[in-house]
Image: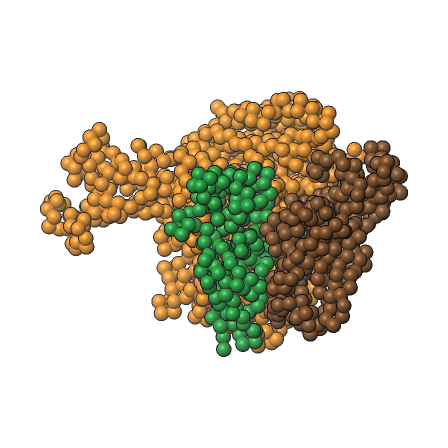
Amino acid sequence: MKPPPFDYHAPHDLDEALAVLAGTGGDGKVLAGGQSLIPLMNMRLAAPAHLVDINRLAGLATVEAGADGVRVGALARHAEVERSERVAQVQPLLRSALGHVAHPVIRNRGTVVGSLAHADPSAELPAVLAVLGGSVRVARHGAPPRDVPAGEFFLGPLEPALAPGELAVSAFFPAVPPRTGTAFVEVARRHGDYAMAGVAAVVTLDDDQRIAAALVACVSAGPVPVVLDLTAACGRRPAASTDWAAVAAEVRDRVDPDGDIHATAGYRRHLTGVLARRALRIAAAEAAGEYGWTDER
Amino acid sequence: MSTRLFGEPVARREDGRLVTGQGRYLDDLGHDALAAAFVRSPHAHARIRDIDVSAALDADGLVAIYTYEDLPERVRDPLPLLIPHPALTHGRTAYPLARDVVRHVGEPVVMVVARDRYLAEDAAALIEVDYEQLKPVVGVEEAVQGAHLVHQDVPGNVGAHLVQEVPSPGGAGAEQEVDAAPHRLSFRLDIERSASMPLEGRGVYARWDADDGSLRVYSSTQTSTSVRMAVAAKLGLPLPKVEVIAPDVGGGFGVKIVHPWPEEVLVPWAAMLLGREVKWTEDRREHFVASAHERAQVQQVRVGFDDEGRVLGLSVTILHDHGAYTPYGIIVPIITATQLLGPYKIGAYRVEFSSIYTNTVQVTPYRGAGRPQAVFCMERTMDKIAAYLGRDRAQVRAANFIQPDEFPYDQGLLFQDGRPLIYDSGDYPESLRLLKELVGWDDFHEVKAEAARHGRRLGIGIGCYVEGTGVGPYEGGHVQVTSDGRVHVSTGLTSQGQGHETVFAQIAATELGVPLDRVSVVTGDTRRFGYAVGTFASRAAVLSGNAIALACRKVREKALRVAAEALEADPRDLEIEDGVVRVAGNPGAGVPLATVAVLSNPLRYAFDEEAVRATQFAGTADLSRPPVDDGDEPGLEGRDYYSPVRSTFASGMHAAVVETDPDTAEIRILRYAVVHDCGRMINPMIVEGQIHGGVAQGVGGALYERMVYDGHGQLLNASFMDFLMPYATEVPYIQTAHLETPSPLNPLGIKGAGEAGVIPVSAVIASAVEDAEGIPVDRMPISPSELHELRRTSRR
Amino acid sequence: MSGKRGWPVGEALHEVSLTVNGVVRQARVPARRLLSDFLRHDLGLTGTHVGCEHGVCGCCTVLLDGAPVRSCLTFAVTVAGQEITTVEGLAGPDGEPSPVQRAFAECHALQCGFCTPGFLCTVTALLRDNPEPDELHIVEGISGNLCRCTGYQNIVKAVGRAAELAREGGEGTA
Ligand SMILES: Cc1cc2nc3c(=O)[nH]c(=O)nc-3n(C[C@H](O)[C@H](O)[C@H](O)COP(=O)(O)OP(=O)(O)OC[C@H]3O[C@@H](n4cnc5c(N)ncnc54)[C@H](O)[C@@H]3O)c2cc1C
Ligand code: FES
Ligand code: FES
């Protein structure tokens, strides 16, 4: 299990990186934290001819939390984002999801943007970006950067909307609006494993504490994060009188997960329903200002 | 004995180097060695049509490529069948490199040697093997249909078939007793594959000295002495010219007892041929597909019992999956068949197993070695009897226990060493009492009811086992006191983390009356001790421990004799304390063991001041006797062997409380309790560590680990991402209590402890989940997904 | 025509210089050289172990600028110029074992010792960031390291004990 050879490029700034990447044609890959790419290379399941290592692009190691949301640069590690109090205030869903991404040691190295660019449907962060309606800023040599909305970024398993020569420079996670709560819950085989099922939920209440909007994104429930709008299913009632079982049933009916060696399709579907219910209730409680709901159970 | 180190939780002596990065594991050696890598079969069953190496010949750093055709006489023969057995009528082993047919994914086909492992893998990737795919045989039930064959000359894929039968005291057979019993049950049980999975894989590093015609091999093995004999035989070398050393070994758990692995033959062979050092370090993917697995069995049970739940007749039929080859014989199913009865007195017993070939990785012992399956079978049976009769599960077990006054107790079977299965000692009722107290068995129904009121689902489970430990044939020990007063102990068996350097030193220090820090221990190095069997079957402490004690006693006797002359005292009045031989009760007069060692070796030459005392003009000699008496030897050293007439039998009982999530079907172990009897404990801290580790592996086997083969014989989870060994977050806190019933069979009164922890765990967890859910659990491991499906199908 | 370990002409070599356990070390290696192999085979620091080479077992964990990372999922070239601490560098300057090392031995937190270097590095960083962790933090903190021998109970105990020893010594653990 040793990686195959490749041509190595270590650009020092973004322009250089984009130029180098453009020069590699279709055979170049970006190396960020390496926590997904290097295992694949060690197993020789990936053999890029060129690696463009972005670890020297200090300018991309940024985490900016403003009133409108959090912008995470391509070199910001999971751990930095997770630790940031400012991020937790502006968009708490990031921290609660990041706690489920692998183990602390992997999070010291892996990047948030790398995780999005990897586009694994069982990963947590794509679901977070999707449920929040965030976007990925994509740059290429000789063209202005473009912002790709989450809904268009995940095309299929391990298939992001990144053309050869393109680099994801940052991702934007919108802030939580007022009277809004979020939650992330998942069930993995072992602590730190990819989820068998997981749900990111965002619930917004109206002035009368009734559910005005309810959105979930489901992990491991399809080829890409599955975003479901459950506002109608929740029926503009206060959280306490919402028929959560019916909401869960709707989620169950609308996802179409695959089975694998860890879980049957039926179990994943069932679990997604259970977790949707849990996540929505937590998010609704948080939106109503009922704190102390930090435990996902 | 004043230096009572035996029985103390002495801190380990190996830790100093291991916590500072100074351990020497296989891949830490041979910095300049060439590296080997293998082209392995991607197919479960295929005929090799052609191997084209031409593209690889120009690869950077390539040194050599070998296929089966390149192998010389003996090396090209099939690997040995290590443990032949009359019932193994169709034993088959692999060639070191595949010849014509490959029979599992991962079988080695081509060996590549290059300047380093990166380059060796590059070259291997360029070799093209043309395969004609054959029909793969996967799963024992498919295999016994015999529609397709793993080996063309093994009809029905049956490698072995064995029946053992113990009639009831009245002379009736088991089937007869079952038919006549007041109550009868029959059911099927399933256990899936897991594997030893040490964190260090296998590895071999060989150095050939052409001038001296000698070979040194380092291997991450559980038996260096036997690897040595095998390598010498395969390579046609005189035994004295071959040395095999097991350096620090990063875990074994059974898989490293198998030998010689193809790589253990090929790497030394290539080193000789090339005149260069060669090393192969197994990577994780290779370990999954090219070493060994264990556990998979399908069991059919018929049991007859009375109103108290006493078993009158038990008949078990086992299909054992032994994978593509049988290098280790049929030890695993034999152990299942013979250890199944556990602590119980069964009316009549019949067990029949068929050991079946499939196109999967071979099956050889993994910690517990067939016992987890045996205990699963017996303990599920006990639970089913209890459920049927509406009785307490512990009570049904107690009704079947062998009583303390019934030892030695003959189960009437032939054990894995070919000797009668006679339990030497134990106290099962007391173990059960301790366990029930530890886990709160009798009050659990209240805990459960209280939890249920809060919507929580709890269950408790129990499992009992008896473990034959310390099997022969023998181990030896050598003890030498040098003239600096240090004690050098060596034994041939190997260490993989059991703390042998510590426990054997404790034994020697206790026997010889010397401080612990004066004793050093070497294991697994054929340069130091050539005769040994190996480390497996919880036998190291029993066999080598006793051998070392006996060797120490020889040394002690001589030390007292020599010191008696120097002190002009009667040896019977002497004792050794703190490394000094002195007259008991007279602290003044004494000679240090260092001096005794000097005096034990009559010298002509004084190489240092101390040695002067032993030279020929020192004036201490009795001139009427030769310097070395008849029957005596120079030096203060002793060698002895311990060879037991039969195995010792350790025992234990575990209980667990689990919680199952009513919605997600997650299973959490809330409490885990162990009562354990391994006879006298040399070092309770180490025994406890062995139990913790065993239980953790058991938890893995019960809830997380399995080898998932698809119908094509592809292993779908050959990585740590998908083969789920438990992390700290998955292993419960383990409470332990010890019972010490000394074994009457050996001088130290010890039984083995190495495997115990793992043995009953699947049975215990199945019992607890069943209790929580009220659904029979007949198949392990069990995942949340499976529990969910079980709930669905039993319409809860 | 070739580097120290005989790298071929075909593959470009990179001069990689790192500060390892306080000492500047360098070697010419191809870009694909994993940090784990660089430490073990190019620098001869074999205390860092390799158990899976896909990031799961944690045996290869070292400290990169103080933070634990998987050396098997890092190319040596990527971290050129940075600081690495391996198990060989955990002891004090006088060779006195660190509180974490002492606690592991004292609590029987290792058997075969293969996983131990990874745990020691992980725990050293854990206690530096959180000198008084409760059991939950400890378990979470070591949850990315596999041990096949100990069942973790004594490792958890050792982490608590190391925190105690560090307090007694009045010193940090790093
Ligand atoms: C043991 C283990 C467990 C894990 N468990 C989880 C888990 O539970 N959940 C989870 O979500 N993840 C998990 N991961 C993966 C981890 O989160 C990775 O960090 C993440 O998926 C990828 O981030 P990276 O920075 O390491 O990317 P890399 O590995 O460097 O790259 C991944 C892919 O994205 C591309 N890429 C990276 N950055 C960019 C960019 N800026 N522009 C364009 N393309 C880019 C690369 O070319 C590559 O194809 C686990 C990893 C390991 C080793
Ligand atoms: S070897 Fe790096 S995590 Fe296993
Ligand atoms: S001590 Fe052996 S793997 Fe941890």
Instruction: Give the percent coordinates (x, y) of residue B730.
Output: 62, 41
Instruction: Give the percent coordinates (x, y) of residue B55.
Output: 61, 75
- Furthest residue to the front? A67
Picture quadrant where residue B757 is located: top right
Residue visible at 64% across and 29% down in the picture: B460
Instruction: Give the percent coordinates (x, y) of residue B160.
Output: 60, 48
Count the marks.
0
Q: Is residue B175 visible?
A: no
**Chain B representation colour:** orange
Q: Is residue B398 above or below residue B11?
A: above
- Colour pattern of the rendering: by chain
The answer to which of B762 and B181 lies nearer the viewer is: B762
Residue visible at 86% across and 36% down in the picture: A208
Picture quadrant where residue B587 is located: top left
Residue visible at 41% across and 61% down in the picture: B216
Q: Is residue C75 above or below residue A105?
A: below
Image quarter hosting the N terminus of chain B: top left
**Chain C representation colour:** green
Residue visible at 65% across and 44% down in the picture: A191
The answer to which of A215 and B31 lies nearer the viewer is: A215
Shown in brown, the chain is A
Instruction: Give the percent coordinates (x, y) of residue B225.
Output: 42, 53
Residue B283 left/right relative to A117:
left
The answer to which of B16 and B76 lies nearer the viewer is: B16
Q: Is residue A223 above or below residue B508?
A: below
Image quarter hosting the C terminus of chain B: top right
Q: Is residue B530 visible?
A: yes
Q: Is residue B526 above or below residue B475?
A: below
